[in-house]
Amino acid sequence: MEGNFLLLLVILSFHVYLTTSSDPDPIQDFCIPKPISSHHHRHFSTSPPCKNSSEVTTEDFIFSGLKSAGKFSQTGFATIPVSPLNFPGLNTLGMSFVRADFKVGAINPPHFHPRATEISHVVKGRVYSGFVDSDNRVYARVVEEGEIMVFPKGLVHFQMNVGDFPATVFASLNSQSPGVQKIPAAVFGSGIDEELLVKAFGLSPKQIGTMKKRFEPEKGK
């Protein structure tokens, strides 16, 4: 009986560790990865060989790609994600960054990051921002210039420029690979069976077909 109790404690402790841990802690000051072959470049971890510290320079820790907005979509939204993929200095440090720009009325649609909490700083404009908790309660308001809002890990969140001028947001995430799933594209652009979607949303097959056509181009992005 005592052995079963100890085993239960071990299992519970391991579960708590898995559910509360983020990226692994680095085991060295930094790891600027050496250039690797293109078919391996999508993921960075402690596995790629690091540059010798004598080869590392200050420039390895500076990223200059956020000075202006990225390419705007047809909806008036632009993002520049910053991760070890384009800024190797972040490798093994457990964080990433993003710049988001909104034309008037533009939105960042409901989405979530399965592996990271996000803190969002409105540096220009007025942005209606919020998230939905696991009881479907919404926490949202207009975030003014200079204010920040946090979006807890794994919860659906969203943003919309409600000002009269373009808006800019900088955000930091506590994972170097936070992942992102946009809800509209995940539901209608992923290939879920149409009959299930009809039953889930109470829409007609024609309406579901229209939604699928709209979001299928985003598939795989």
Image (tube, rainbow, N blue to C red):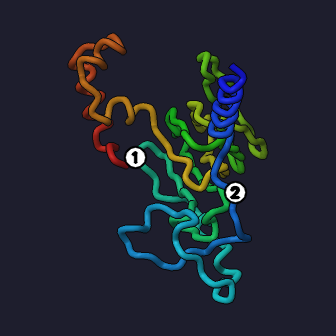
- Left or right: residue 110 versus residue 209 is right
Please tell me which of labels 1 and 2 falls first in the chain.
Answer: 2
Foreground of the two, 166 or 177: 177
Picture coordinates of residue 98, whole percent (x, y): 60, 54
Kind of residue sitting beneath label 2 = Asp
Q: In which quarter of the image is the N terminus?
A: top right
Label 2 crowding class (10 Å Cα cut-off): few <14, some 14-19, many 20+?
few
Classify residue 207 by image quadrant. top left
Side (left or right) of 20 relative to 147: left
Q: What percent of the width, then of the height, locates residue 13?
A: 70, 34
How far is disc 1 from disc 2 in space, using C-alphas?
40 Å
Tell me: residue 40, above or below residue 171. below
**Residue to which mark 1 is pinned:** 74
| Residue visible at 35% across and 68% down in the picture | 39
Task: Tell me the SS state at disc 2.
Answer: loop
Q: Which amino acid type corresponds to the residue marked 1 in the rendered image?
A: Gln
Across and down, in percent, residue 195 comes to 24, 17
